[in-house]
Image (cartoon, coloured by chain):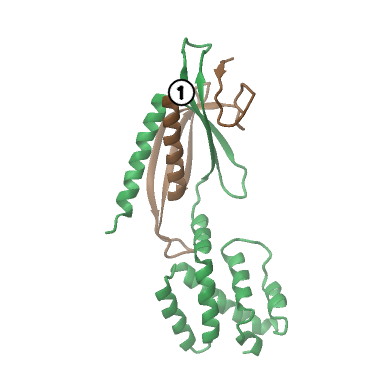
Amino acid sequence: MVGTLNRAMEESSEPQLDAKSKVTNQLIDFQWKLGMAVSSDSCRSLKYPYVAVMLKVADHSGQVKNKSFEMTIPQFQNFYRQFKEIAAIIETV
Amino acid sequence: MAAELESSKCLSGLLSGLAQDTFYGHPGITEELLRSQLYPEVSLEEFRPFLAKMKGILKSIASADMDFNQLEAFLTAQTKKQGGITSEQAAVISKFWKSHKTKIRESLMNQSCWDRGLRGLSWRVDGKSQSRHSAQIHTPVAIMELEIGRSGQESEFLCLEFDEVKVSQVLKKLSEVEESISTLMQPA
């Protein structure tokens, strides 16, 4: 059992991860693509940019999986902003 | 055309119903429901082509993502057509598009996104003080949980662990994305 000094963002007296997923994965690779949806059968004038992400993750057993998802630009910017916050905090811990 | 159909009183409600069905994907908005709720005096035979016409107009406007100039030009043309719309109806349609444009566009964007989306993100930073596997002293770790999925389907919760080095690597990638976005958004 890994002992952790838990400085959780939310108040938590539990030493374990209170994440919904029980397994923590390591990020092996992060690939991204900036796409532009131009047109579709329901909308001839879509014109919206999006960020597509492909994560390569490994679980504790070493099994590697690909996980992909898309973000709108505002969603990406929120993601980026949160990551910057993490970086700032992790430096000070 | 029945007088009731000419009047623009219930047209706003009709357009809302059409938007619910065509763009927001709400089930159960049938022809008969719209007729009985909004134009009960009108027969189904007369209502059907009227509904089709309004649906066609709304879909054209949404499909072209018309700005207000294009909208005015388009609606004016519709008023001049044989079997077109009245200028009163044009005004109602114009008002409807102006207030619903953003939401309808968002729906269309969602409809064309076939991969899973990022539905949620939560994280915390832990300071690891010891580990069974190595003598790490005070190694901070970021734990991030991504909720990935599509609406109407169960999400996948992906839990990732990052050390400081990894956070920095990912941050660099994200700044590359940001740079690409800036380049894309620059006026031609």
Q: Chain B in the picture: what colour?
A: green
Identify the residue under disc 1.
A93
The x and y percentages for residue B113 are 49, 52
- Quadrant of residue B34 within the rendered picture: bottom right
User: In what element is the residue under mark 1?
Assistant: loop
Residue B4 x/y as whole percent? 66, 86
Q: How many marks?
A: 1
> Residue A43 vs residue B150: left or right?
left
Up-down relation of residue B15 to residue A13 (above or below) = below
Give the residue drawn at x 45%, y 49%: A74
Instruction: Inspect this view and state whether residue B145 appears.
Output: no
Depth order, front residue of B3/B187? B187
B67 is higher (above) or lower (below) than B91: above
Q: In the image, what residue occupies the spot 72% across and 84% down?
A: B41
Res. B96 in view: yes
Observer-nearest of A75 and B127: B127
Q: Judge by depth and name the residue closer to the eye, B2 or A64.
A: B2
State which chain disc 1 sits on: A
Amino acid, disc 1: Val
Label 1: few (<14), some (14–19) or many (≥20) C-alpha neighbours in 10 Å: some
Colour assigned to chain A in the rendering is brown
Instruction: State which quadrant residue A11 falls in.
Output: top right
Question: Where is residue B6 shown, x and y percent of the image?
Answer: 60, 87
Quarter occupied by the N terminus of chain A: top right
Residue B133 lies, in percent from the top left, at: 50, 11
Q: Is residue B29 above or below residue A19?
A: below
At x 56% / y 27%, what residue is drawn? A8
